[in-house]
Amino acid sequence: MSVFAAVVTGTVFFVILSQKVTILTVVLGALMSLAAYLFTRPTHFERFPVLVLKLIYHMPKAILESIVVMLSSRERSAYEVSVEDEWEELEKTLTITLTPKTLVVVSDEGYIVVHRVGRR
């Protein structure tokens, strides 16, 4: 399943970057994606498109919070968030750090420490 997800994702990115949809660009994209997958052998790659969609989903929140940070008080707090595995840790770190009011400062096995400006 990871091979299929890697080839489809890589082909879509290649077609977008080349700005044309032809048989040649699709075939080249698929071959380059397959070669990259075989050389790197990434784990959990089938979850990558979901991660990209989650980041896109959180972007409006990040823009709104950046405006709020500029207009709000400087109150700060820190709290811990539990995580189950490395993939969830990566996913939460990216989505938390995407917002301007929060920042992951410590990432350890089973939890991450988040610093936040403003109330939780």
Image (cartoon, grey):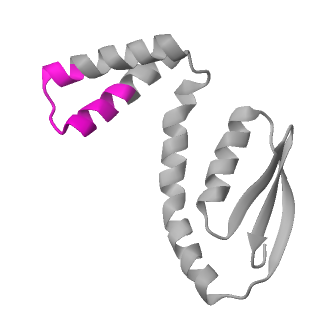
Q: Quadrant of residue 71?
A: bottom right
User: From the image, which quarter does the C terminus lie in?
Assistant: bottom right
Residue shown at the point (32%, 26%) measured from the top left: 11
Residue 47 percent location from the top left of the image:
56, 31
Q: Which residues are magenta?
A: 10-26
Does any portion of residue 37 appear in the rendered image? Answer: yes
> How many tags in the picture?
0
Q: Is residue 81 left or right of residue 46?
A: right
Q: Is residue 19 magenta?
A: yes
Residue 93 percent location from the top left of the image:
69, 49
Residue 17 percent location from the top left of the image:
26, 38
Predominant SS of the magenta segment:
helix
Residue shown at the point (48%, 36%) measured from the top left: 49
Q: Quadrant of residue 25?
A: top left
Residue shown at the point (65%, 57%) measured from the top left: 97
Q: Is residue 78 above or below residue 35?
A: below
Q: Quadrant of residue 61?
A: bottom right
Q: Is residue 78 above or below residue 54?
A: below
Residue 32 percent location from the top left of the image:
33, 18
The one of 69 and 119 positioned closer to us in this rendering: 69
Q: Is residue 16 magenta?
A: yes
Q: Is residue 54 above or below residue 85?
A: below
Q: Is residue 84 left or right of residue 33?
A: right
Residue shown at the point (76%, 69%) measured from the top left: 116
The one of 44 and 66 positioned closer to us in this rendering: 66
Q: Is residue 37 above or below residue 61?
A: above
Does any portion of residue 1 appear in the rendered image? Answer: no
